[in-house]
């Protein structure tokens, strides 16, 4: 018997073609210059930087990076959020909305995720962007690509993922700017015939970070942020400049108004004077490496780090969590707080047990932190296991909870079941 999950998987692109048909009517009436932003990590940050650069000249696909989300975004419709009954409304409303609705901005800046096989290919063939900005590639949603490896289509999951992302450059008409520090991306770009600009670490001339501030010098341009940003952000800043040069306009240097998306290294004052850094939005090894390196370079005393499980790793779950433990052990932080069965089983054995505590439940981690923190610490959060609920218990200003990730009603309900 075929499981419900397998039926949904098989129907995914079949059903989305229905919505693409009507979204395409609206898109043709709009006819924007399309800038695609893609990658395993860092693409939302780049999209927000592009919003500073292009302002109201562009429409941005905030919170919509899947095939369904992009269709609904083009139609100006809210997707399915918390109610399965809304599907009926969407099926009826899409044809009607397509007859009259269109965005009016010159550019469409669209974030595209390579979450599952054939989805990026589907979007690339349809949207055919003028510009693609490729930030990174890593083992995000790796579980969805295990089947392609088992079937012999690719030697590794990484090969399968980079192949999926590479459809966007293949269907790009004018410019692909990409992270040339990634061997996987460089190899994928070799056979793609389009105007290409690679950016690498040579662009970064200076980097300094504090709990509430970061300063970069990239290609002789100084950028200052009011939140801790990872060193690897030089990639997005260099890609931003490559786009500005393509558009023949100056790159925006004043980023004081830049607002970091929730859960991406956001700074919050905590109880007792504790400094909180929320990077709980997502987690896989490439983003873990980035945040650990950021925290290691941060100018701050008494560094504590709270790490949740890395999910959706499929057959590599054990090895990825062991690698995480090895990464953390090299950083030498003052305290490690692990949350989840995967970090407890595979990551904990790699660490100094005198400085490490582990919990299966985030509620217990929250109680431990409330009890043990004295006020002198900086605490960084990274990973799954509802860490945003743990942070909420530690905020000096309870109203800051609205700035944490996953604040929709369904997510709050799930956290409440976990006692958070």
Image (cartoon, rainbow, N blue to C red):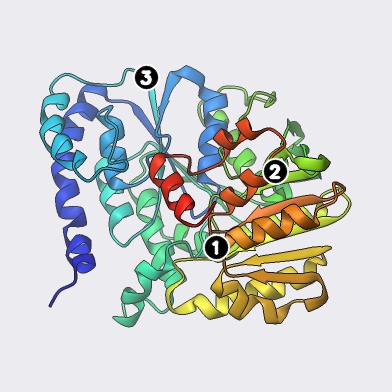
Q: Is residue 9 left or right of residue 129?
A: left
- Residue 278: give x, y in percent of width and height: 65, 46
Circle on res. 311: none
- Residue 125 visible in the shown view: yes
Query: Secondary structure beneath disc 3?
Result: loop
Q: Toward the viewer: 306 or 45?
A: 306
Query: Secondary structure beneath disc 2?
Result: loop
Q: Is residue 92 left or right of residue 267?
A: left
Q: CA distance from mark 1 to mark 2?
A: 17 Å
- Residue 359: give x, y in percent of width and height: 63, 69
- Residue 182 visible in the shown view: no
Q: Toward the viewer: 45 or 389?
A: 389
Q: Toward the viewer: 299 or 208?
A: 299
According to the image, label 2 marks what residue?
Answer: 229
- Residue 394: give x, y in percent of width and height: 69, 45
Q: Is residue 401 left or right of residue 7?
A: right
Q: State whether residue 241 is above or below residue 38.
A: above
According to the image, label 3 marks what residue?
Answer: 105
Q: CA distance from mark 1 to mark 3?
A: 35 Å
Q: Toward the viewer: 178 or 267?
A: 267
First along the sequence among labels 1 and 2:
2
First along the sequence among labels 1 and 3:
3
According to the image, label 1 marks what residue?
Answer: 284
Q: Residue at x 31, y 39 (%)?
A: 70
Residue mark closest to the camera, 1 vs 3: 1
Q: State whether residue 71 is above or below residue 156.
A: above
Number of other residues with Cα within 10 Å of mark 2, as a class: few under 14, some 14 to 19, many 20 or more: many
């Amino acid at each position: 018997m075929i499981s419900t999950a397998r039926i949904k998987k098989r129907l995914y692109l079949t059903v989305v073609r229905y919505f693409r048909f009507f979204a395409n009517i609206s898109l043709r009436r709009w006819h924007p210059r399309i800038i695609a932003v893609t990658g395993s990590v860092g693409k939302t940050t780049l999209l927000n930087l592009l919003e500073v650069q292009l302002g109201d000249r562009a429409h941005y696909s905030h919170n919509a990076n899947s095939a369904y989300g992009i269709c609904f975004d083009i139609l100006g419709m809210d997707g399915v959020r918390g109610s399965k009954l809304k599907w009926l409304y969407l099926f009826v409303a899409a044809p009607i909305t397509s007859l009259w609705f269109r965005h009016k901005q010159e550019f469409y800046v669209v974030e595209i995720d390579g979450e599952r096989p054939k989805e990026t290919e589907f979007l690339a063939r349809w949207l055919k962007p003028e510009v693609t900005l490729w930030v990174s590639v890593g083992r995000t949603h790796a579980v969805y690509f295990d089947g392609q490896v088992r079937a012999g289509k690719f030697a590794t999951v990484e090969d399968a993922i980079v192949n999926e992302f590479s459809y966007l450059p293949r269907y790009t008409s004018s410019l692909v700017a990409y992270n040339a520090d990634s061997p996987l991306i460089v190899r994928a770009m070799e056979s793609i015939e389009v105007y290409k600009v690679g950016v690498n670490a040579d662009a970064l001339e200076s980097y300094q970070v504090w709990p509430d501030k970061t300063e970069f010098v990239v290609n002789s341009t100084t950028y200052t942020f009011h939140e801790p940003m990872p060193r690897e952000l030089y990639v997005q800043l260099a890609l931003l400049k490559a786009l500005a040069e393509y558009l023949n306009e100056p790159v925006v240097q004043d980023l004081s108004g830049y607002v970091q998306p929730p859960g991406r290294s956001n700074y919050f004052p905590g109880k007792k004077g504790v400094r909180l850094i929320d990077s709980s939005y997502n987690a896989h090894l490439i983003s873990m490496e980035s945040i650990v390196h950021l925290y290691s370079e941060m100018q701050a005393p008494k560094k504590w780090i709270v790490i949740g499980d890395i999910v959706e790793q499929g057959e590599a779950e054990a090895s990825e969590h062991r690698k995480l433990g090895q990464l953390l052990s090299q950083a030498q932080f003052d305290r490690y707080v692990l949350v989840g069965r995967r970090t407890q089983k595979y990551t904990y054995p790699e660490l100094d047990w005198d400085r490490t505590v582990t919990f299966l439940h985030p509620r217990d981690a929250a109680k431990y932190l409330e009890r043990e923190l004295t006020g002198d610490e900086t605490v960084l959060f990274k990973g799954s296991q509802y860490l945003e609920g743990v942070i909420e218990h530690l905020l000096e200003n309870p109203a800051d909870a609205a700035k944490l990730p996953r604040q929709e009603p369904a997510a709050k309900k799930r956290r409440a079941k976990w006692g958070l």
